[in-house]
Image (spheres, grey):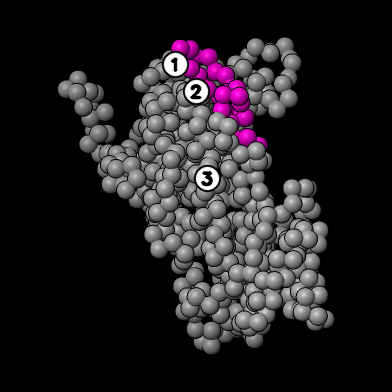
Amino acid sequence: MSEEAAPSQLNQSLQDKIFNDPIHGSIELHPLLVKIIDTPQFQRLRHIKQLGAGYWVYPGASHNRFEHSIGVAHLAERLVKRFQEKQPELNITNRDSLCVQIAGLCHDLGHGPFSHLYDNMFIPEAQPGSKWKHEDASFKMLEHMVEENKLRDEMKKYDMNPDEDLKFIKELILGVDTSAEKWPEKRARTEDKSFLYEIVSNKRNGIDVDKWDYFARDCHHLGISKSFDHERLLKLTRVCKVKIKELQKQKVETQETDKERLLICFRDKEADNIYDMFRTRYTLHRQAYQHKTVNIIEIMIKEALLFADDHFKISAAKDDMPEYTKLTDAIFETILHIDIDSLQLDNTEKKKLQDAKDKVEKIVKRDLPKFVGEARLPEREMPPSLQNILKDNWVKAMEKETKEDAVNPDDYVVDVVQMDIGMKGKNPTDNVFFYSKWNPNEAFKMDKKKMSSFLPERFYEKLVRVYYRGGTDDILKTAKECFKNWSENNFGL
């Protein structure tokens, strides 16, 4: 801080708090972000594992949503600061910067117990047809936090407009489509600030600081190596004008064919680094997030939560922020240690709680269903009810293999796993724009002929896995043989 610094800047600097982070080193956070961190709603994230059930397989994966959220806020601040320093013509205000940092800090406030297990596995079965995602609760929790802790007054201290800026933060958390032909007038920031919407949650190509943090953090804690370098990519990032017609899936011809939008672009020599980023995503899914043992433990936790839902209102909590604040991974221990006999419940309710308790006790004792086999599904369109169809086909295959008329479907778990490198079946660089050293203001798409010849032809795969719940070794051996024949025959599809 120079001697000429304004008193307000000096006061802010004195209030900044430094966090020592194993990934990013010393992180200095704005006092408003510290106020947010020091609330019960944010502190809740200390008790939600970043990788769900991954800790049951990887002993190092003990990190939580708390430290990840701080890391995302830090990277968001660094990227915005780079744009402010290198491209002052973008007119990024300190208010803009604070909004982006808060969005990075609060983007995961809505996660439920065991992170994605709650919204991707539990809620769809607890509330069939629900479209709810954790991002929906993130902003509701932020609003609740602001009101409960009187943070509007804190926001005003830093020249923020709480109503307008909270709307902007919501848009940043949920993500918006920056490739849309027309920029909505009702959006919290005008079109000249469109690039700000690509920092925390980039809906155009998936390259954002959220991924930069969790790729680095998860690899560190899992002990998985990576070649992707987010530090280098951050320093070779620039905002450029991109023709809107180039953003469309089918190029449009309108009266505004030459209209441009300011979006985030990367140096052309970083194309391979970006591919490494998406490869890292696939590696993490293949080796950790959807590891076969992680999968079956998450299925068992999901089943326990479903059995316990009526008693603990686990699914209903997501619509009640004071109750949701109390809901963390601790629900596992609550189910494990519940004294069912002391409860004034009918036999049906007690049976459900006992089933839930049995599930978590099996996890603790490592009494898990046995892995039968895994195979890649055919490359063709599959029906929406694929998992149920495969389960029925598997039971019929086992009946034929064992020559028994009644194979118990409950003895088996048939799970469908989807993996991609970021953009479903699309080439991840299709929506990425680059700039060159010689012309840093001109955005262009990379010629595929200039890309590495080692790139995959496919960017998406779907797997089927079968597990056996029983304890008979002979049946397990038979099931393994059956799976081999079943998969070779394309699963009876």
Image spot of residue 419 (x, y percent): 61, 49
Q: In this rendering, would 415 be left or right of 356?
A: right
Q: Residue furthest bottom?
A: 341
**N-terminal of the two: label 2 or label 3?**
2
Foreground residue, 38 or 490? Answer: 490
Image spot of residue 112 (x, y percent): 52, 58
What range of the chain is rendered magenta?
A: 426-451
Quadrant location, the N terminus: top left
Label 1 CA crowd tier, 10 Å (few <14, some 14–19, many 20+): few
Circle on res. 268: 2
The amino acid marked with disc number 2 is Asp
Q: In this rendering, would 286 be left or right of 492?
A: left
The amino acid marked with disc number 1 is Lys
The residue shown at (68%, 55%) is: 376
- Disc 1, disc 2: CB below 8 Å? yes
Task: Please give the residue where the numbered disc 3 appears in the rendered image.
Answer: 281
